[in-house]
Image: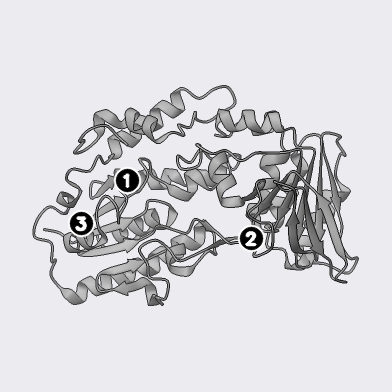
Amino acid sequence: MSVQVAVVGSGPAGCYTAQALLKARPGVGITLVERLPVPFGLVRYGVAADHQGTKAVTRQFDRVLAHPDVSFVGNVEVGTDVSLEALRSSFDAVVIATGLDRDRRLGIAGEDLPGVVASGRLTRWANGHPDATHAPPCLGRRVVVIGNGNVAIDVVRLLAKEQSDFEGSDLPGEVASALAAARVEEVVVVGRGAVADARFDPAMVKELAHISGATFDVEGLTSGDASPQAHALRHLRDGQRRGDRVTVRFRFGWTPVRIAGNGRVEEVVFADTTRTERSVVTDLVVSAIGFTGPAALVPDDMRAEEGRVGSGLYCVGWAHRGPRGTIPDARADARLVAAAVLDDLDARRTSSVRSDPQRCFAGVPATDLAGWHAIDHHERSTAGHGRTRNKVTDRRALLQLARPHLNHLEGEPA
Protein backbone atom coordinates (compact mmCIF):
# COMPACT_ATOMS: atom_id res chain seq x y z
CA MET A 1 0.00 0.00 0.00
CA SER A 2 1.18 3.55 -0.77
CA VAL A 3 2.13 5.97 1.97
CA GLN A 4 -1.01 7.30 3.69
CA VAL A 5 -1.23 10.76 5.29
CA ALA A 6 -4.16 12.21 7.23
CA VAL A 7 -4.56 16.00 7.34
CA VAL A 8 -6.90 17.18 10.11
CA GLY A 9 -8.56 20.36 8.85
CA SER A 10 -9.49 21.37 5.31
CA GLY A 11 -8.89 25.11 5.46
CA PRO A 12 -6.05 26.85 3.61
CA ALA A 13 -3.25 25.21 5.63
CA GLY A 14 -4.74 21.74 5.24
CA CYS A 15 -5.48 22.05 1.53
CA TYR A 16 -2.10 23.59 0.77
CA THR A 17 -0.41 20.76 2.69
CA ALA A 18 -2.26 18.20 0.59
CA GLN A 19 -1.32 20.11 -2.55
CA ALA A 20 2.36 20.22 -1.57
CA LEU A 21 2.43 16.51 -0.74
CA LEU A 22 0.81 15.59 -4.06
CA LYS A 23 3.25 17.71 -6.02
CA ALA A 24 6.34 16.42 -4.23
CA ARG A 25 5.31 12.76 -4.01
CA PRO A 26 2.86 11.54 -6.67
CA GLY A 27 0.96 8.51 -5.45
CA VAL A 28 0.82 9.45 -1.79
CA GLY A 29 -2.63 8.83 -0.34
CA ILE A 30 -4.14 11.79 1.50
CA THR A 31 -7.26 11.93 3.66
CA LEU A 32 -8.55 15.37 4.62
CA VAL A 33 -10.50 15.05 7.87
CA GLU A 34 -12.86 17.94 8.62
CA ARG A 35 -14.97 18.62 11.73
CA LEU A 36 -17.70 20.34 9.68
CA PRO A 37 -19.73 18.69 6.91
CA VAL A 38 -18.15 21.06 4.35
CA PRO A 39 -14.55 21.91 3.43
CA PHE A 40 -12.44 25.09 3.23
CA GLY A 41 -12.57 26.27 6.86
CA LEU A 42 -11.32 29.85 7.14
CA VAL A 43 -12.04 30.64 3.48
CA ARG A 44 -15.71 29.71 3.84
CA TYR A 45 -16.25 30.92 7.39
CA GLY A 46 -13.58 33.55 8.05
CA VAL A 47 -12.94 35.52 4.86
CA ALA A 48 -15.46 38.35 4.64
CA ALA A 49 -18.54 37.71 2.52
CA ASP A 50 -17.81 40.73 0.31
CA HIS A 51 -14.24 39.57 -0.48
CA GLN A 52 -15.13 37.03 -3.13
CA GLY A 53 -11.78 37.51 -4.84
CA THR A 54 -10.04 36.07 -1.79
CA LYS A 55 -12.57 33.25 -1.54
CA ALA A 56 -11.74 32.29 -5.15
CA VAL A 57 -8.73 30.36 -3.81
CA THR A 58 -11.22 27.52 -3.28
CA ARG A 59 -10.95 26.82 -7.02
CA GLN A 60 -7.43 25.55 -6.32
CA PHE A 61 -8.67 23.59 -3.35
CA ASP A 62 -11.49 22.05 -5.41
CA ARG A 63 -8.82 20.58 -7.68
CA VAL A 64 -7.00 19.20 -4.65
CA LEU A 65 -10.16 17.51 -3.37
CA ALA A 66 -10.91 16.09 -6.83
CA HIS A 67 -7.47 14.45 -7.09
CA PRO A 68 -7.81 10.64 -7.26
CA ASP A 69 -5.35 10.19 -4.39
CA VAL A 70 -7.30 12.51 -2.05
CA SER A 71 -10.30 11.59 0.11
CA PHE A 72 -12.49 14.11 1.92
CA VAL A 73 -13.99 12.94 5.21
CA GLY A 74 -16.26 15.61 6.66
CA ASN A 75 -18.44 15.81 9.77
CA VAL A 76 -15.76 13.98 11.78
CA GLU A 77 -14.23 15.59 14.85
CA VAL A 78 -10.89 14.11 15.83
CA GLY A 79 -10.88 13.61 19.57
CA THR A 80 -14.65 12.96 19.66
CA ASP A 81 -15.75 10.82 16.71
CA VAL A 82 -12.34 9.22 16.26
CA SER A 83 -9.35 9.47 18.57
CA LEU A 84 -6.06 11.01 17.54
CA GLU A 85 -4.42 7.74 18.61
CA ALA A 86 -6.63 5.77 16.21
CA LEU A 87 -5.72 8.17 13.43
CA ARG A 88 -2.00 7.87 14.15
CA SER A 89 -2.17 4.08 14.18
CA SER A 90 -4.05 4.03 10.86
CA PHE A 91 -1.88 6.47 8.88
CA ASP A 92 1.84 6.84 8.29
CA ALA A 93 1.64 10.53 9.22
CA VAL A 94 -0.96 12.88 10.68
CA VAL A 95 -0.84 16.66 10.11
CA ILE A 96 -2.89 18.93 12.38
CA ALA A 97 -4.27 21.91 10.43
CA THR A 98 -7.12 22.94 12.72
CA GLY A 99 -6.18 26.61 13.03
CA LEU A 100 -7.11 28.76 16.03
CA ASP A 101 -10.59 30.09 16.74
CA ARG A 102 -10.42 31.24 20.36
CA ASP A 103 -10.60 35.04 20.62
CA ARG A 104 -8.00 36.83 22.70
CA ARG A 105 -9.53 38.50 25.74
CA LEU A 106 -9.21 42.20 26.48
CA GLY A 107 -8.40 41.61 30.14
CA ILE A 108 -10.41 44.58 31.43
CA ALA A 109 -13.41 44.99 33.71
CA GLY A 110 -16.78 44.63 32.01
CA GLU A 111 -15.75 42.59 28.99
CA ASP A 112 -18.25 39.87 29.95
CA LEU A 113 -21.22 42.24 29.90
CA PRO A 114 -23.98 41.50 27.39
CA GLY A 115 -23.32 43.54 24.28
CA VAL A 116 -19.60 42.78 24.23
CA VAL A 117 -18.76 40.31 21.49
CA ALA A 118 -15.46 39.00 20.17
CA SER A 119 -14.80 39.46 16.46
CA GLY A 120 -14.40 35.71 15.91
CA ARG A 121 -17.91 35.06 17.14
CA LEU A 122 -19.31 37.97 15.11
CA THR A 123 -17.60 36.98 11.86
CA ARG A 124 -18.55 33.31 12.25
CA TRP A 125 -22.18 34.39 12.61
CA ALA A 126 -21.85 36.74 9.64
CA ASN A 127 -20.38 33.93 7.53
CA GLY A 128 -23.06 31.40 8.45
CA HIS A 129 -20.91 29.08 10.57
CA PRO A 130 -23.09 26.22 11.89
CA ASP A 131 -21.73 26.68 15.43
CA ALA A 132 -22.69 30.37 15.55
CA THR A 133 -26.14 30.66 14.00
CA HIS A 134 -28.06 29.57 17.12
CA ALA A 135 -27.05 32.68 19.10
CA PRO A 136 -26.79 35.78 16.88
CA PRO A 137 -25.26 38.83 18.56
CA CYS A 138 -27.53 41.65 19.67
CA LEU A 139 -26.59 44.53 17.37
CA GLY A 140 -27.07 48.24 18.06
CA ARG A 141 -26.94 51.63 16.37
CA ARG A 142 -23.68 52.67 18.06
CA VAL A 143 -20.69 50.33 17.87
CA VAL A 144 -17.14 50.45 19.23
CA VAL A 145 -14.56 48.22 17.53
CA ILE A 146 -11.42 47.67 19.60
CA GLY A 147 -8.45 46.79 17.40
CA ASN A 148 -7.01 48.07 14.14
CA GLY A 149 -6.05 45.00 12.14
CA ASN A 150 -7.71 43.59 9.04
CA VAL A 151 -10.44 41.84 11.02
CA ALA A 152 -11.41 45.17 12.58
CA ILE A 153 -11.77 46.65 9.09
CA ASP A 154 -13.84 43.62 8.04
CA VAL A 155 -16.15 44.35 10.97
CA VAL A 156 -16.45 48.00 9.93
CA ARG A 157 -17.50 47.03 6.41
CA LEU A 158 -19.96 44.47 7.74
CA LEU A 159 -21.67 46.94 10.06
CA ALA A 160 -21.42 50.14 7.99
CA LYS A 161 -22.46 48.89 4.57
CA GLU A 162 -26.04 49.01 3.38
CA GLN A 163 -27.71 46.12 1.60
CA SER A 164 -26.86 47.22 -1.94
CA ASP A 165 -23.16 47.23 -0.99
CA PHE A 166 -23.27 43.44 -0.54
CA GLU A 167 -24.18 42.72 -4.17
CA GLY A 168 -22.09 39.79 -5.41
CA SER A 169 -21.35 38.45 -1.92
CA ASP A 170 -22.42 35.28 -0.11
CA LEU A 171 -23.76 37.08 2.98
CA PRO A 172 -26.51 34.85 4.44
CA GLY A 173 -30.03 36.25 4.19
CA GLU A 174 -30.70 36.12 7.94
CA VAL A 175 -27.50 38.08 8.59
CA ALA A 176 -28.43 40.70 6.00
CA SER A 177 -31.85 41.10 7.63
CA ALA A 178 -30.35 41.52 11.10
CA LEU A 179 -27.89 44.14 9.86
CA ALA A 180 -30.62 46.06 8.07
CA ALA A 181 -32.79 46.03 11.21
CA ALA A 182 -29.92 47.31 13.38
CA ARG A 183 -29.51 50.47 11.28
CA VAL A 184 -26.00 51.17 12.53
CA GLU A 185 -25.35 54.93 12.71
CA GLU A 186 -21.87 55.15 14.24
CA VAL A 187 -18.81 52.90 14.32
CA VAL A 188 -15.80 54.00 16.40
CA VAL A 189 -12.60 52.08 15.61
CA VAL A 190 -10.03 52.35 18.39
CA GLY A 191 -6.38 51.26 18.39
CA ARG A 192 -3.97 51.57 21.29
CA GLY A 193 -0.98 52.31 19.06
CA ALA A 194 -0.13 55.19 16.76
CA VAL A 195 -1.32 55.29 13.14
CA ALA A 196 1.98 53.90 11.85
CA ASP A 197 1.62 50.91 14.20
CA ALA A 198 -1.81 49.91 12.88
CA ARG A 199 -1.86 46.39 11.44
CA PHE A 200 -4.52 46.88 8.80
CA ASP A 201 -3.75 46.54 5.11
CA PRO A 202 -3.86 50.12 3.73
CA ALA A 203 -5.76 48.86 0.68
CA MET A 204 -8.58 47.67 2.95
CA VAL A 205 -8.91 51.13 4.50
CA LYS A 206 -9.07 52.76 1.07
CA GLU A 207 -11.80 50.25 0.17
CA LEU A 208 -14.02 51.77 2.87
CA ALA A 209 -14.44 54.84 0.66
CA HIS A 210 -16.87 52.82 -1.49
CA ILE A 211 -19.39 52.46 1.35
CA SER A 212 -22.42 54.46 0.30
CA GLY A 213 -23.80 57.08 2.69
CA ALA A 214 -20.75 57.05 4.99
CA THR A 215 -18.74 59.86 6.56
CA PHE A 216 -15.25 59.26 7.94
CA ASP A 217 -13.69 61.08 10.88
CA VAL A 218 -10.00 60.44 11.61
CA GLU A 219 -8.08 61.63 14.67
CA GLY A 220 -4.44 60.92 15.42
CA LEU A 221 -2.90 61.74 12.05
CA THR A 222 0.20 63.93 12.13
CA SER A 223 1.60 65.92 9.21
CA GLY A 224 4.95 64.15 9.42
CA ASP A 225 3.57 60.61 9.33
CA ALA A 226 4.44 59.20 5.91
CA SER A 227 3.51 55.61 6.73
CA PRO A 228 1.31 53.63 4.30
CA GLN A 229 -1.36 53.51 7.01
CA ALA A 230 -1.39 57.32 7.31
CA HIS A 231 -1.54 57.70 3.54
CA ALA A 232 -4.55 55.37 3.38
CA LEU A 233 -6.37 57.25 6.13
CA ARG A 234 -5.72 60.62 4.46
CA HIS A 235 -7.03 59.18 1.19
CA LEU A 236 -10.17 58.08 3.02
CA ARG A 237 -10.63 61.36 4.91
CA ASP A 238 -9.87 63.78 2.10
CA GLY A 239 -11.61 61.94 -0.71
CA GLN A 240 -14.86 61.09 1.08
CA ARG A 241 -18.29 62.05 -0.16
CA ARG A 242 -19.71 62.67 3.35
CA GLY A 243 -22.94 60.76 3.60
CA ASP A 244 -25.53 61.05 6.36
CA ARG A 245 -26.35 57.37 6.95
CA VAL A 246 -23.38 56.20 9.06
CA THR A 247 -20.26 57.80 10.55
CA VAL A 248 -17.04 55.84 10.97
CA ARG A 249 -14.52 57.33 13.40
CA PHE A 250 -10.89 56.27 13.78
CA ARG A 251 -9.07 56.90 17.05
CA PHE A 252 -5.43 56.04 17.77
CA GLY A 253 -3.33 55.95 20.94
CA TRP A 254 -6.33 55.01 23.09
CA THR A 255 -5.97 52.08 25.49
CA PRO A 256 -9.16 50.37 26.76
CA VAL A 257 -9.50 50.73 30.53
CA ARG A 258 -12.96 49.36 31.35
CA ILE A 259 -16.37 48.63 29.90
CA ALA A 260 -19.34 49.83 31.93
CA GLY A 261 -23.09 49.42 31.90
CA ASN A 262 -26.15 48.51 33.96
CA GLY A 263 -26.99 44.97 32.87
CA ARG A 264 -25.42 45.42 29.44
CA VAL A 265 -22.75 47.55 27.81
CA GLU A 266 -23.36 51.31 27.80
CA GLU A 267 -19.90 52.84 27.46
CA VAL A 268 -16.22 52.08 26.99
CA VAL A 269 -13.59 54.08 28.83
CA PHE A 270 -10.17 54.55 27.22
CA ALA A 271 -6.97 56.30 28.30
CA ASP A 272 -5.21 58.38 25.66
CA THR A 273 -1.46 58.98 25.42
CA THR A 274 -1.69 61.66 28.13
CA ARG A 275 -3.56 59.21 30.41
CA THR A 276 -6.68 61.32 30.07
CA GLU A 277 -9.81 59.17 30.16
CA ARG A 278 -12.02 59.19 27.05
CA SER A 279 -15.52 57.75 27.30
CA VAL A 280 -17.45 56.47 24.27
CA VAL A 281 -21.17 55.72 24.63
CA THR A 282 -22.13 52.58 22.73
CA ASP A 283 -24.68 49.78 22.28
CA LEU A 284 -22.19 47.14 21.11
CA VAL A 285 -18.48 46.48 21.61
CA VAL A 286 -16.59 44.26 19.19
CA SER A 287 -13.18 43.11 20.38
CA ALA A 288 -10.92 42.50 17.38
CA ILE A 289 -7.52 41.97 18.97
CA GLY A 290 -6.68 38.58 17.50
CA PHE A 291 -6.84 34.93 18.41
CA THR A 292 -4.97 32.73 20.83
CA GLY A 293 -3.97 29.11 21.32
CA PRO A 294 -3.38 26.39 21.98
CA ALA A 295 -4.54 24.67 18.81
CA ALA A 296 -6.78 21.65 19.19
CA LEU A 297 -4.80 18.40 19.44
CA VAL A 298 -1.46 20.23 19.81
CA PRO A 299 0.09 20.49 23.31
CA ASP A 300 0.28 24.15 24.37
CA ASP A 301 3.91 23.83 25.45
CA MET A 302 5.07 22.18 22.23
CA ARG A 303 7.76 23.89 20.14
CA ALA A 304 7.22 22.27 16.77
CA GLU A 305 10.36 22.63 14.67
CA GLU A 306 9.33 22.38 10.99
CA GLY A 307 5.92 21.35 12.29
CA ARG A 308 7.10 18.19 14.06
CA VAL A 309 5.05 17.45 17.18
CA GLY A 310 5.92 13.78 17.67
CA SER A 311 6.75 10.66 15.72
CA GLY A 312 4.57 10.82 12.61
CA LEU A 313 2.62 13.79 14.02
CA TYR A 314 2.89 17.35 12.64
CA CYS A 315 1.11 20.70 12.75
CA VAL A 316 0.79 23.39 10.10
CA GLY A 317 -0.63 26.90 9.63
CA TRP A 318 -1.85 28.71 12.73
CA ALA A 319 -1.68 25.42 14.66
CA HIS A 320 2.07 25.61 13.98
CA ARG A 321 2.96 29.32 13.81
CA GLY A 322 0.31 30.84 16.03
CA PRO A 323 -2.36 33.39 15.03
CA ARG A 324 -0.47 35.41 12.49
CA GLY A 325 -0.07 35.47 8.75
CA THR A 326 -2.33 35.41 5.72
CA ILE A 327 -3.48 32.72 3.29
CA PRO A 328 -0.22 32.99 1.25
CA ASP A 329 1.70 32.48 4.50
CA ALA A 330 -0.27 29.27 5.04
CA ARG A 331 0.92 28.04 1.65
CA ALA A 332 4.57 28.69 2.51
CA ASP A 333 4.24 26.92 5.85
CA ALA A 334 2.45 23.99 4.21
CA ARG A 335 5.37 23.48 1.83
CA LEU A 336 7.80 23.51 4.76
CA VAL A 337 5.82 20.99 6.79
CA ALA A 338 5.10 18.75 3.79
CA ALA A 339 8.84 18.56 3.13
CA ALA A 340 9.44 17.52 6.74
CA VAL A 341 6.74 14.84 6.49
CA LEU A 342 8.28 13.37 3.35
CA ASP A 343 11.84 13.54 4.74
CA ASP A 344 10.73 11.56 7.78
CA LEU A 345 8.83 9.04 5.68
CA ASP A 346 11.86 8.57 3.45
CA ALA A 347 13.98 7.89 6.52
CA ARG A 348 11.47 5.26 7.58
CA ARG A 349 11.61 3.74 4.07
CA THR A 350 8.48 1.58 4.37
CA SER A 351 4.83 2.33 5.04
CA SER A 352 3.45 1.12 8.36
CA VAL A 353 -0.11 1.00 7.02
CA ARG A 354 -1.21 -2.57 6.33
CA SER A 355 -4.98 -2.11 5.77
CA ASP A 356 -7.42 0.51 4.52
CA PRO A 357 -6.89 3.55 6.81
CA GLN A 358 -10.49 4.64 6.15
CA ARG A 359 -11.64 1.84 8.44
CA CYS A 360 -11.00 4.09 11.45
CA PHE A 361 -14.03 6.15 10.36
CA ALA A 362 -16.39 3.13 10.29
CA GLY A 363 -19.71 3.89 11.94
CA VAL A 364 -19.24 7.67 11.76
CA PRO A 365 -21.78 9.63 9.63
CA ALA A 366 -19.06 11.23 7.53
CA THR A 367 -19.72 13.39 4.50
CA ASP A 368 -17.61 12.86 1.39
CA LEU A 369 -16.76 14.82 -1.73
CA ALA A 370 -20.04 13.91 -3.44
CA GLY A 371 -21.90 15.20 -0.38
CA TRP A 372 -20.00 18.49 -0.56
CA HIS A 373 -20.79 18.77 -4.25
CA ALA A 374 -24.50 18.28 -3.46
CA ILE A 375 -24.37 21.06 -0.85
CA ASP A 376 -22.38 23.34 -3.16
CA HIS A 377 -24.83 22.80 -6.04
CA HIS A 378 -27.80 23.55 -3.79
CA GLU A 379 -26.26 26.75 -2.45
CA ARG A 380 -25.33 28.04 -5.88
CA SER A 381 -28.55 27.06 -7.64
CA THR A 382 -30.80 28.62 -4.99
CA ALA A 383 -28.84 31.86 -4.57
CA GLY A 384 -31.04 34.94 -4.62
CA HIS A 385 -30.51 38.06 -6.68
CA GLY A 386 -27.16 39.66 -5.95
CA ARG A 387 -25.76 36.65 -4.09
CA THR A 388 -23.15 34.11 -5.22
CA ARG A 389 -24.65 31.38 -3.05
CA ASN A 390 -27.47 30.73 -0.60
CA LYS A 391 -25.26 29.54 2.21
CA VAL A 392 -26.80 26.79 4.35
CA THR A 393 -26.06 27.67 7.96
CA ASP A 394 -27.61 24.79 9.91
CA ARG A 395 -25.59 21.60 10.43
CA ARG A 396 -28.66 19.34 10.24
CA ALA A 397 -29.68 20.93 6.95
CA LEU A 398 -26.17 20.45 5.58
CA LEU A 399 -26.28 16.78 6.51
CA GLN A 400 -29.73 16.37 4.98
CA LEU A 401 -28.42 17.75 1.69
CA ALA A 402 -25.46 15.38 1.84
CA ARG A 403 -27.57 12.43 3.07
CA PRO A 404 -27.48 10.37 -0.17
CA HIS A 405 -23.70 10.55 0.04
CA LEU A 406 -23.16 9.98 3.78
CA ASN A 407 -20.72 7.18 4.60
CA HIS A 408 -21.46 4.70 7.40
CA LEU A 409 -24.65 6.55 8.38
CA GLU A 410 -26.09 5.16 11.61
CA GLY A 411 -29.26 6.78 12.90
CA GLU A 412 -30.30 10.38 12.57
CA PRO A 413 -27.72 13.16 12.45
CA ALA A 414 -27.29 14.92 15.77
Residue at x 26% of width, y 57% of height: 6
Q: Earlier in the sequence, mark 2 or mark 3?
A: 3
Q: Which residue is mark 3?
A: 27
What distance separates the C-alpha of mark 2 from that of mark 3? 42 Å
Residue 274 at least partly seen: yes
User: Left or right of 408: which side holds 153?
Assistant: right
Check disc 3 and give the amino acid type: Gly
Q: Residue 289: which disc?
A: 2
> Closer to the camera, 345 or 172?
172
Q: Which residue is mark 1?
A: 65
Q: Earlier in the sequence, mark 2 or mark 1?
A: 1
Check disc 1 and give the amino acid type: Leu
The C terminus sits in image quarter: top left
Residue 24 at least partly seen: no
> Closer to the camera, 327 or 218?
218
Marks 2, 1: nearer the viewer: 2
> Closer to the camera, 378 or 407?
407
